[in-house]
Image (cartoon, rainbow, N blue to C red):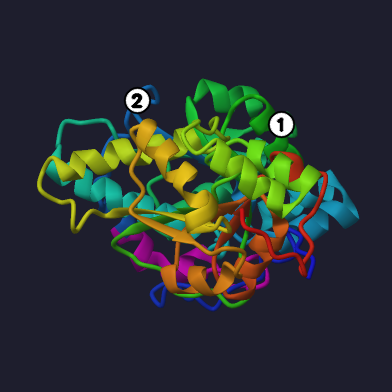
Amino acid sequence: MSLDPVQVMKRQDSLPKTCPSASNGDSKASWDDSKDIHENVGSTKKPKPPKPENAVTIAVSSRVLFHTEKEQKVFEQQGIEEYLRYQVEHENEPFAPGPAFPLVKALEAVNNHLRELYPESEELFDIVLVTYNHANVGIRLINTINYHNLFIERFCMTGGSSPTGYLKAWHTNLYLSADTAKVQEALSEGIAAATMFMSEKQIEVSKTQLKVAFDGDAVLFSDESERIFKAHGLDKFFEHERENENTLLDHGPLKGFLEVLGKLQKKFYAKGHRLDCPIRTYLVTARSAASSGIRALKTLRAWGLEIDEALFLAGAPKGPMLEKIRPHIYFDDQMFHVEGAVEMGAIAAHVPYGIAQKYPHKKSTNTGK
């Protein structure tokens, strides 16, 4: 199975029942068909967004927040001018939700809880829409955001320019895109980033608790141990981990994102909400618990980071576990595991970082990392 981040994002039958006219451009239904809904949305007073320096900033591209496959085909087959003309002609037709949509809704739910507990605090999630699109497409994007009642006030439409500089200016904690090249560029600048995927069949995720799952090596941790495995095999990997049990692993590209999640979790713990915290984190790793898992746990503890659940699978497939967890997003550096998650209906994101990008994981290989 080979996934393309654009092609795999098929339209889902998961649109809100109150929004029957949402489309990816195929429907002729217009904004006016849901006039009463949008008037109600417009009358809702929205809170002010936090200052970027105080917020946990999640930057999402329009191609992962919404389904834009038809528009992308127009661009690829007919060029930029026809693409812009098409977008303007259809700007009253909102896009359907994409793979990042459930995540954004969960982030908003967490913000609601935080505002209840800390009314004056700006330590909140802040969603920034970052897109290569020309500003002429902005009206359709704004219409879509209002249609789905999303709280996204910050836009960055680069008109074809690289978004990396803007990501830095926004103090971005995580960037999600459908374009691997952009993701790699962000990672090279020290910004946590991943390419999002979602299968045609999507399992239902929680609307009240944000669930984020991480692989270990080359995601939370460096690819040091992965390099040992790739160069010398499984036995040498186990030997290396035993010898270095008390040596901390270096950090990986998403360590900082786990840190900010943990910081927000502690705000809930301080108010007595440890057991019912609306943020839950998972470590889902192919490492074996007895032979190599202890080093990962000791590293997290030394960093002062907590993980709510740790699954050491000893090379077993991750897909069935992720189907049970039902995360809003799962991060892995190996496309083999991303594909396994997508096959089970989970929302997954590829982190194109580390040695595994040069030596793809074979489906027949059973590893301990």
- Residue sitting nearer the eye, 17 or 315: 315
Q: Residue at x 48, y 76 (%)?
A: 20
Give neighbour class at mark 2: few <14, some 14-19, many 20+ (Cα, 10 Å): some
Q: Quadrant of residue 190?
A: top right
The percent coordinates of residue 172 (x first, y second) are 50, 30
Q: Secondary structure at mark 2?
A: loop
- Residue sitting nearer the eye, 113 or 140: 113
Q: Is residue 237 magenta?
A: no
Give neighbour class at mark 1: few <14, some 14-19, many 20+ (Cα, 10 Å): some
Mark 1 and mark 2: span between their CA atoms?
25 Å
| Image disc number at residue 51 | 2
The percent coordinates of residue 13 (x first, y second) are 54, 78
Q: Is residue 78 left or right of residue 233?
A: right
Q: Quadrant of residue 90?
A: bottom right
Question: Which residues, given as a range, are shown in magenta?
Answer: 22-40
The percent coordinates of residue 311 (x first, y second) are 45, 61
Q: Is residue 42 left or right of residue 314?
A: left
Q: Amino acid at mark 1?
A: Glu
Residue 70 in view (yes/no): yes
Q: Amino acid at mark 2?
A: Lys
Q: Secondary structure at mark 1?
A: helix
Per the image, the residue denoted by label 1 is 185
